[in-house]
């Protein structure tokens, strides 16, 4: 659920929006226009519920190489007999 807080900063009015959904970390942003705040809140709520929301700063700290290494280490060993073929495509060692 989103809550909007109207704030008078002395330089003008801003709107701080907080989106809280149970089981997910709260998200917040500040906007100069109320319509922008409402639009962000709605799209953020939908993205979180559909498990498509990734905070930009967190996503930018990860690289594709890290993803491949993690996949090779954590997922491929659980896959079964075809894991050796798939591991050859990755960067890490072959599962034993």
Image (cartoon, helix red, strand yellow):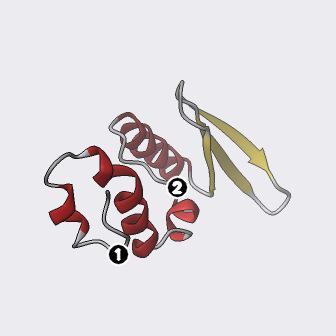
Residue 40 percent location from the top left of the image:
47, 49
- In the picture, measured across the screen, residue 1 lies left or right of residue 26, that is left
Residue ID at (70%, 41%): 6
Q: Are marks 2 and 1 in contact (CB under 8 Å)?
A: no
Residue 49 percent location from the top left of the image:
38, 34
Residue 60 percent location from the top left of the image:
52, 70
- In the picture, measured across the screen, residue 92 lies left or right of residue 23, that is left
Residue 75 percent location from the top left of the image:
33, 50
- Where disc 1 sits, the SS reads loop
Name the foreground residue: 61 vs 76: 76
State the residue position of label 2. 55
Q: Quadrant of residue 61?
A: bottom right
Name the foreground residue: 46 vs 70: 70
Farthest-out residue, front:
96
Mark 1 neighbour density, 10 Å: few (under 14) some (14–19) many (20 or more)? some
Point out which mark residue 24 bears. none
Farthest-out residue, right:
10
Point out which mark residue 91 bears. 1
């Amino acid at each position: 659920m989103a809550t909007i807080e109207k704030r008078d900063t002395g330089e003008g009015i801003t709107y701080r929006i907080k989106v809280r959904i149970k089981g997910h970390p709260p998200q917040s942003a500040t906007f100069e226009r109320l319509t922008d705040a409402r639009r962000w809140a709605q799209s953020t709520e939908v993205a979180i519920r559909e498990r498509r929301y990734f905070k930009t700063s967190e996503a930018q700290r990860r690289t594709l190489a890290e993803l491949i290494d993690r996949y090779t280490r954590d997922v491929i060993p659980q896959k079964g007999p075809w894991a050796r073929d798939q591991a050859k495509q990755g960067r890490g060692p072959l599962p034993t």
